[in-house]
Amino acid sequence: MKQLFLLLILLAVVNAVHAQPADWHHKAGLEIRYSTTAPNGSRILYLTRDDETVVTCVNVQTGAKEWSRPLGKLKEYRVVRFIGNDTVLVGNGNKYEFLNARDGALITSIPISDEAWSDLAWEEKADEGSDTLRPYFEGGIGIYYFDESFQILDLEKLSVVYQSPMPIRKVHYYKWDNVLMIQPLSGVDTFYFVDLHEKRVVYKVSKYDEPLNSSVYQPFAISLNELLLFNERDIQSIDMTTGKVNAKIDVDPDDPEFYAPIIFNKGLYLLVSDDNVQKLYHTKDGKLLWQTPEGAIPGIVEQMIELPNNEALMLGYESDGKTTVYKINTVTGQKLWSRLIFIQDGELKPGHKQGGKFWATVGTIALTVARSYLRGAGRSYSYGSSSDLMYRNDPFGRYGSFNRFDQENYERDMRTINGLYNKWVNRQKKSDGYATVVRRMDDRITFAVAGKIYPPNDDGTTRDYTGEALMTLNLNDGSVAESKPFQMFSKAEYSGFNAVTDMKIQAFDSTQVLVGVHDIYVLRGNALEQVPFGDGQTLKMLKTGVDEITVMADSDGERFDYWRINVAGPATRRFLIARSTQANVTFLDSASVSTSIRFTEDHIEAFPLIEGNATDASFASPKWKLSEKDLDKMNIGDLDNKVAPDNRTQGISIVGGDVLLMGGDGLGFVSSDGACRWSYEWSPKQDVKKLGVTKVGSAIAYSLGKITKCYGTDCPSKEIGSHKISPSDCEVSITQNGAMIVVDRDEGEIHCYRTAR
């Protein structure tokens, strides 16, 4: 302890050492009006202006100027941007100029659609209900709005996609799969639909000729080459290849209780559920294929799952609380069998109507995303009802196939239907009980049936919520092949419980993780494994990674345990990352964790990563400890503020094996073995945050208010970089190879610190 005390005194002296010089320092000679860095961090562009505007390119590795080019009287500096890493777009005269990023040579130029760049619209803030009117980039296209016109550019082929002599003065965007809808709110009266993959306008229509339904959450949907528009009076099917109307479906979007576009192997269909009658339309010709007799399939059907041989499953939620799975013939609508799977006290509230109108329908086209995106091995995706779908490996499917049916991937799609549905259809849907498909194998299908629900054989006497289970049905006759009871939400006591949004399922290649209120369940093959946490702990899923999730277990606000659950191997492993008396642990990056910490109000201890249940023996031999006196000497202030898991200015974070302490008055660091410790004063409560605390190579950096700092994590600690720059004049960027670039616009200087040693 005496050695630690002396070390802290020494570090207090070290903290006064001035910052070391940058790896390179570039002087522009004039005020820098604007700067931007290539996506891979290889180059930085900056603009200066004297008699004319000049763009200059600097090599980030060497700090050497590579080229410069005059841009005339251009004042719209933010027009300049990298297109990928090899091409630069600038404005010059009345043209777009595309330059080679290596030498600044002109590749090609395109005239702008107005007289001068000064006519370019560039809103700083959008009005309520609209998006910001400024250059818009999505999926390889760029949209530029001028005073009297607008243009859509293909930024890959460097050509014009579309040009209109009429302006758009206010705009709103909708996007689904590979199609972007441009909705003018003022100016031109035409809606535009742009295919982001083919880089072309596939359809345009006057809002006066075909007024879109003003109350739907997502006013269009797509499936392959078919576009559905939800108008005020009907639903239209558009051929995206020809731009012609296939058919009009005589369904007023405001009338039914519920409807959903459904993607099947053979194309796009529309399911309409109203007054205990189910109808199925074929959208390309608008024909009603069938409707069930009244009461044959009662309630609201809000899921339809395709099976082989022209068959499908439908989940019907009745007003008396019964939820039933139906197997039907998709050609005739004939009911083949039915199976009651649970009963709830209330009923499903689809929440589609707002102000007497539907406003959410189209999101069920989530199936389109499932069909188009989830291809190839190595992906994981979370579904369940409130979580976003997470993609890895070409997340937007730009190089995949969008017109082939793949049975293996289609089965994977089945496991994402509900999550996509809930994300896109209706954020107001509510139910005490809900069923989610977790898998289908051969003639079996498994549902996660969860919530405050009763089993189907409940006679109403016990009134205990014992209906939760992983329920597997035989697809041939609807019999229950297997039912594995679990407790996801039956003991949930918090107000506002909603099984639709609270059910969270993380699916990996060979396992699925179900996160409940008090326990986690892992479905591996046919085995259901429970990862218990106890009735007194309420779980909150924080983040996902490769074959792992991170959760916080809250013990009635008195203790917070942070666990990482890994399902990569044949058995589930659980690791305690942190135990704290406050919800003050944050996660700065996805680095593997090799240290566990325990925090109380008066000390912090670190341990080798704790695996399995944390007992008293797990905390017997700390690697290092900071006592209350040690923390006082570090002068970092309070660490017990409640923080979000992605907070980058307050809290405690484990980065690999090291521990970072972001207090109210100072920033502290302790190495994995405890031998290296340092702290610096700071003021994290700044109005402007250019860069929250970030691990950069072997350093820690941040830019808050006027202060930009970079510290080495070695001992003795050094300030690698230190700058005091007004936030309006400061830009900070981090490159892929571990360099931090600081731009001081007012002084016309660029500083680069390469921290990956």
Image: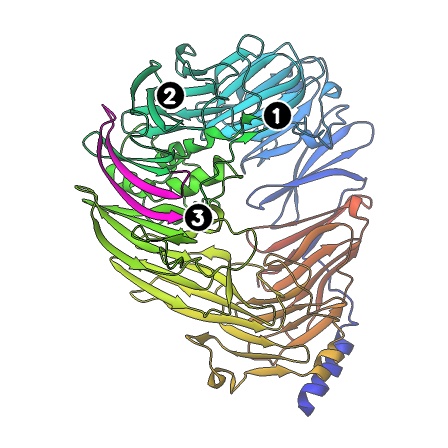
Q: Is residue 220 left or right of residue 164?
A: left
Magenta-drawn stretch contains 266: no
* Front residue (pair 17, 364): 364
Give how far apart the Cα atoms at labels 3 and 1 are.
Answer: 41 Å
Query: Which label sits on residue 345?
Result: 3
Foreground residue among 102 and 644 = 644
Query: What residue lies at 54% left-to-right and 20% top-to-bottom?
Result: 213
Return the mark for residue 378. Answer: none
485 to the left or right of 594: left
Q: Main secondary structure of the magenta part?
A: strand
Q: Position of residue 227 (x, y in %)?
A: 42, 20
Residue 333 lies within the magenta run: yes
* Residue for badge 1: 172
Q: Which residues are magenta?
A: 318-345
Residue type for callout 2: Asn
Q: CA distance from mark 3 to mark 2?
A: 43 Å
Residue type (three-letter) at the residue carrying disc 1: His
Picture quarter with the N terminus: bottom right
**Residue 564 position within the rendered picture, expressed as x and y whole percent measured from the top left:** 46, 65
- Residue at 53% from the left image edge and 11% from the top image edge: 210
Q: Answer yes or no: is residue 234 visible.
A: yes
Mark 2 or 1, nearer chain start: 1
